[in-house]
Image (cartoon, rainbow, N blue to C red):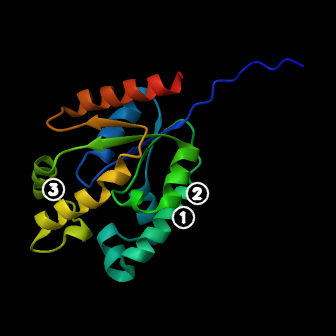
Amino acid sequence: MFRPFLYMTKAWILVGMMGSGKSTVGKAVAEASGREFIDTDVLLQNRFGRTIPQIFSLYGEETFRAHETSVLKSVSCANCVLSTGGGIVTRLENWTEMKRLGIVAYLHADWKTLAERLEQSKRKRPLLDRTDWKEELERLMNEREPQYRQADFVIEVDQQDINVAAQRVIDEFQQREAV
């Protein structure tokens, strides 16, 4: 019996350093594309009933990362934009899950852009809660860069207007889904 090919939509997943714009650009991508927006950090906060800094403070990074993996494994969306935490790439099993869910984009910003954005941000970043936070940011960037580069494609977001960056992300995702 002949069965017509059904077009399968994949999740659009955003990875990148803290401050790269995953949540901000992700919301704009979701709105412009008519997809649902999901943020793994929000899912974690809902699970614990606490903020990310509180989770880190009370339970530590290892517990946070274990729950981050659990949350990622529980996500089942095809027609969504999934914004992930900056450190989700540090666990190999998370890459397996992200590839299962869909297409992964790395939002890349240089150190100067990230430092400026993080300095202006009202959100506390637990891994940067220290006096030498800029040095720690640089260390984390250097450590994670090879992991981020495992994404299906890279979008440079330095000095990008949110809507311009979002449209570039949408264009790349749509191009890859059409293959």
Quick one: quadrant of the N terminus?
Answer: top right
Q: Earlier in the sequence, mark 3 or mark 1?
A: 1
- Residue at (47% x, 34% y) in the render: 35
- Residue 29, relative to residue 125: is it above or below? above
Residue type pointed to by label 3: Leu
3 or 146: nearer the eye? 146
Where residue 174 sits in the image (x, y, percent)? 45, 24
Q: Secondary structure at mark 3?
A: helix
Give the alpha-carbon distance from disc 2 to disc 3, as whole Å. 29 Å
In the rendered image, the vertical position of residue 87 relative to residue 78, given as above or below: below
Q: Position of residue 40 (x, y in %)?
A: 43, 56
Residue tagged 2: 74
Q: Quadrant of residue 49?
A: bottom left
Q: Residue at x 36, y 60 (%)?
A: 87
The residue singled out by tag 1 in the image is 70
The crowding category of the residue bearing disc 2, from other C-alpha atoms within 10 Å (few below 14, some 14 to 19, many at least 20), is few
Image location (x, y in percent) of residue 52: 33, 67
Residue 177 numbered tag: none
Can residue 149 be seen here? The reply is: yes
Estimate the spatial distance between the alpha carbons at disc 2 and disc 1, rounded to whole Å. 6 Å
Disc sitting over residue 118 in the figure: 3
